[in-house]
Image (cartoon, rainbow, N blue to C red):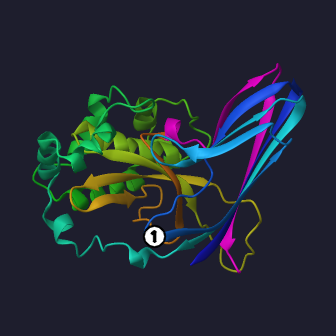
Amino acid sequence: MLFKVIHITAYDYDEAITHCHNIANLKPIEFLGQKLVDYSLEISPLPSYLEEGKDFFKNTICRFSIDQPHKKLIVNSTSIIERNFNLQPDIYTSLICKKTTVQDVINELKKGTEEMLSVHEFTLDSYFIKNISPKIKEYAEVSLQPDRNVFEATNELMQRIFKDFTFDSQFSTIATPLEEVMKAKKGVCQDFAQIGIACLRSVGLPARYVSGYIETLPPPGKEKLVGTDASHAWFSVYIPQFGWVDFDPTNDQIPKNQHIITSYGRDYFDVPPLKGVLYGSGNSKMKVSVDIRPAVI
């Protein structure tokens, strides 16, 4: 399947900003089953400095600076992505996935092999997921028992988050602590992904945050509106000798072709679409527009 993703972020400032330094994390990564066919990034005003590179997690990022006064900043990312989930190993028939238990993964981590050292950091505290509460660990242990198949146990955890938590875009912000999300059982995809990661890490499993997009479809008989899609987030667990397996607790599904990945990190703090520092005063308003639809070349 071929998709076109247009992601526009616009900032309006009350007062002119004299300088800004930013990092854009908008370029989709490539892996078996996802190919980046085309990509462009348009920034207004034109940056005085712009450089593309890799971050610590091997995501492609763009650093840019603007050193002229401006009251508006627009960052427009356009991607053409080819998705073919069938190219990826089948998690349902894999003997490794079927045989590996939660305790097996923990035991492999203790061996300190090169493979497991490469994912060890995803078992540790991160900026938004730290000092995991006993309440979250208790919730995790209902599914993540040591002798259970790790894939089946994580799949059940995903299903429980989907059933137990309510999607509420007004409840949380980026800074809302996980304990509050856990108590209220409300939040958005970012919160549900981080709850899942916290649960997995609470029992010693490597878990990472996945940032990207998901294709949404309009109600039957309705035309899809431009710009009404949004960024999305889900989580992955690592299974030794197999690799990372993704789970989307917001939609209760294993991500396939409709999920497009831009970046991986320990939590949202590592991979926001846009972050930076600006010099100026006054308030700002941010507007984000995302449009995802089948592409024609």
Q: What residue span does the magenta drawing correspond to? A: 268-297
SS state under label 1: loop
Q: Position of residue 22 (x, y in %)?
A: 69, 35
165 up-or-down from 133: above or below? below
| Quadrant in the picture for the N terminus | bottom right
Q: Position of residue 240 (x, y in %)?
A: 21, 56
Q: Looking at the picture, how far across and down is residue 286, in whole percent?
A: 76, 39
Please tell me in which quadrant of the rendered image residue 214 appears.
bottom right
> Residue 273, can we see it?
no
Instruction: Look at the picture and state if 196 lies above or below 83.
Output: above
On-image quarter of the C terminus: bottom right
| Residue 208 placement, left or right of 7 | left
Q: Is residue 92 left or right of residue 82?
A: left
Q: Which residue is mark 1?
A: 256
Q: Is residue 212 above or below residue 67?
A: below
Residue 249 placed where, x, y %?
42, 55
Query: Which of the 4 quarters of the picture holds residue 132?
Result: top left
Q: Residue at x 77, y 65 (%)?
A: 226
- Let me know if residue 138 is in the magenta part: no
At horizontal 67% and vertical 60% (from top left) the residue drawn is: 229
Tell me what residue is drawn at x 47 percent, y 61 percent: 251
Q: Is residue 189 something that shows in the picture? A: yes
Residue nearest the observer in this picture, 136 or 45: 45
How many C-alpha atoms fall within 10 Å of the one at disc 1: few (<14), some, or many (≥20)?
some
Q: Would you say 43 lies left or right of 100 here?
A: right
Residue at screen point 51% across, 41% down: 55
Left or right, 183 with reference to 262: left
Identify which amino acid the numbered label 1 is placed on.
Lys
